[in-house]
Image: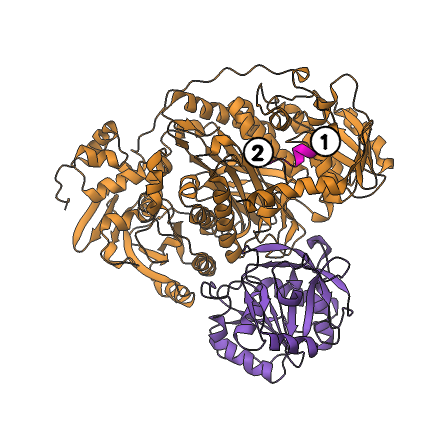
Chain colours: A purple, B orange
Amino acid sequence: MKANVIVFPGSNCDRDAAVALQSAMSAAGNVMSAPKMVWHGDSELPESDLILVPGGFSYGDYLRSGAMAAHSPIMREVVRQAKSGTPVLGICNGFQVLTEAGLLPGVLMRNASLRFICKDVYLRVERDDTAFAGHYQKDQVVRIPIAHKDGCYFADPSTMYLLENEDRIAFRYCEEDGAITEAANPNGSSANIAGIYNDTGTVLGMMPHPERLIDPALYGTDGAKMFSSLVEKLH
Amino acid sequence: MAPETPALSEELVAEHGISPEEYVRLLEELGREPTLTELGVFSVMWSEHCSYKSSRVWLKKLPTSGPQVIQGPGENAGVVSLGDGQAAVFKMESHNHPSYIEPYQGAATGVGGIMRDVFTMGARPIANMNALRFGSPSHPKTRHLVAGVVSGIGDYGNCMGVPTIGGETNFDPRYNDNILVNAMCVGLVDANRIFKSAAKGVGLPVVYVGSKTGRDGIHGATMASAEFDETSEEKRPTVQVGDPFTEKLLVEACLELMNEDVIIAIQDMGAAGLTSSSVEMADKGGVGIDLDLDKVPMREEGMTAYEMLLSESQERMLMVLKPGSEPVAERIFTKWELDFAVIGKTTVTGHFVARHNGTVEADIPLPALAHAAPVYERPYEKRDPLPAIAAKDVSAPPSILNALERLIGSPHLSSRRWIYEQYDHMVMADTVQRPGGDSGVVRVHGTQKGLAVSCDVTPRYCAADPYEGGKQAVAECWRNLTATGAKPLAITDCLNFGNPERPEIMGEFVSAIEGMAEACKVFHFPVVSGNVSLYNETNGVAIPPTPAVGGVGLIADIAEMSDIALKADGDVILLLGKETGHLGQSIYMTVMEDRLEGAPPPVDLASERVMGDLVRGFIKSGTVDAVHDCGDGGLLVAIAEMALAGKRGVALEAPPADMPAHAVWFGEDQARYVVTATPDKVDTIKDVAAIYNVPVRVLGTVSEDTITVPGEAPLPLGMLRAAYEDWLPRFMTQG
């Protein structure tokens, strides 16, 4: 599998994401090339099987998270390839960038608590028929950390209706037993949304960080299945 | 050509924090009257903050060497070897005065400054910690200060992508008007690629990189060298403003440039900005330095030489490069969209020269700034130790478990989750022990090695007995590292005290250093970097002596690491160490009786060392399943913390009958650890401990989901957890 990881000057989860992908490749006996790190100022993006937009603070995010990054030279290429069907995974700040770039609907607003929150949360898997979630089962509860200040997902009612009816919600914040409750919602997101797909299920944006739980030494391995699924399905 | 210099008024000299005696010395060193710019330069370089003039003679008492030490005090940060050609670079620094005046920016720039100290040495920062002291929860400013400091620390470290893996927070009315914000950073570097600050060589380009210079932070170093009064709020303009995104660019650009073989010396512009960085580099290199201030990238117009030299604008670095390598450096800094300017050169003159608009604004012999700074052997008075208080003179509670609930739900012991969840503690995906245990631990990327980090001091002990308190700070840090299985390597310190011109404060300082030095020697646990913050007092009332210690330890293989969480029902809980039931200066005394009296628990360093080595051996051999240092709040609090972390209950046996029960459960005797083991390992633990004369007592077993002690109704873990988790969020959302 060939993967491109987009690196903005303020990205800080680019290495973590590349490591997670790389270890999934190694585990699958896949000895193909390491994920390629692509600088934000580049205007050319090598053709690939997966584009990963990692977490961080793209350009400092003093304006609005991801707003400036959405207009960087490389994002024009990301948008073009995404529209032609190349799978794109945006994690945390990457999710914010994908919404600002118009690849995904809605916005990520300041957390309801107004504070940065870093902790493990439970997610209910809403779909398992995509390249991203193929190693999870629908309705399975997984534990993945969040770390953000602007993760409150919001969209207008017609978009929300579309997301629900087109089965485009990827993950929802839930209790340990899978119940969708207000108490389990860490940031005030509409309908407890933690991640959404585009209309073809090829672009996924999510606030939680699967790349941070890929190893028992890091308190869990629930994140690893996203990368193993991508490696298998996009082979 | 020496500048034209009319005599400066006494008031102006005094406003610069220079005493009449110091001014006489300044005139002798310079051989003439200084310009206003020169007076400004002297004022910051001779300030307590930059010159360590009150503390220097005493700091020499601290041991600073050992086979593991690659770089001791004197550079931007200390360096210790991790084996395999790797090294850890670390330092702790205070940002107390600015954080009280402007908590968000003060704390943020404190974090930014300490990270710059670490990456200046060539290291990538891999872990942050902080030690915070706030006033009483009932003080009207406390909530505002906590909120601002925590969010300032979080926003800066989070944006940098460096995990904040722990720390400590105290509430004590003695910090009402002087909070303490001490930030620590640990970085990782190849031992053969460490960068230093000596600008050796003449005619070399002096390069300025990073943010532009503005008027912020002028006289920050001088502010940090004076006490507060009612007018302190007016000092807000002396607080710097942080820009973590620029710092993120700066770390990446600097590390990228460090891969090229072009840097001769590098120094971050911290306190006293351009002045301090250029003076230190030139002085260490044994050369002069000539700065053309017209070349300095400016954020605002019309700044004078005085303002430019004293500005503490953040996210700036000064470098001395190999001649001809400017284009390589410029290309990298342009890529990262940072300012880059050649602003001067090193010279043979041995002088610090600054020119602006065609005028020589300063021309000072470097030794006058770097070495002629006054060094004071200030008079000091040591206090008589307080008499010990017998356990029977501290009243027993009606219920032990009820007392536990009160203690663990108090401001002193309650969960710090509200704080650490605002810090990204997992970024870099190597955090193998998250906040809430004895130490934070990060894996050395790509290896099985772990770095344990802990920040410690117990201010109430130090206030009661600075000598024992100094010992205890080092001992507790040593224990916290040991409890993870780490071999403690070295410490950095952050010595926070009141006004050293008062003999009783100087006495606290001297005693604390003596205690720390003693402990460091016994543990072979040297001090490799540090910082002194004096004048932490307002209207003549000083903070408790607070010598914060930040320690780093090495875990050879994280698979052999231990933590505080109880692991399995049926495991036996054991106490290692001697019990005396010491309640003086305990959390029990302050929570239950609202008083802090008597001597703090004495620290037997020899026992500490034996205990530490014993426990580390048990961890390495896999004999124990969980380990926790027995500290604040005593034995029962330690057990409760282990239960909460492991989500398992405990059934405890009756305590020894020869001591009051509350003294057994809540006494704060030092040199103790609580461990758990499967029943088949208990005899081994007893046998080995007996060889070292270490007492072992079986406390009970891990079972179900309640805390039980004989004769009382079981305390459900859920209730204990509610008490533990409730206090801080509730406090922060009130009013």
Residue B124 to residue B653: above or below = below
Residue at point 31%, 36% (across, down): B46
Read off the magenta span: B402-411
Residue lying furthest bottom: A84
Which amino acid type is marked by label 1? Asn
Which amino acid type is marked by label 2? Phe
Q: Disc 2 is attached to a residue of which chain?
A: B
User: Which residue is label 1 attached to?
Assistant: B402
Q: Disc 1 is attached to a residue of which chain?
A: B
Horizontal and vertical percent position of residue B241: 39, 52
Kindly state the secondary structure of the residue where label 1 is placed. helix
Of residue B585 and residue A217, the one placed in the foreground of this image is B585
Q: Place residue B562 in its image quadrant.
A: top right
Residue B556 highlighted magenta (yes or no) = no
Q: Place residue A87 in its image quadrant.
A: bottom right
Label 2: few (<14), some (14–19) or many (≥20) C-alpha neighbours in 10 Å? many
Kindly state the secondary structure of the residue where label 2 is placed. loop
The numbered mark, 2 or 1, whose residue comes first in the sequence reads 1
Residue at point 53%, 16% (across, down): B385
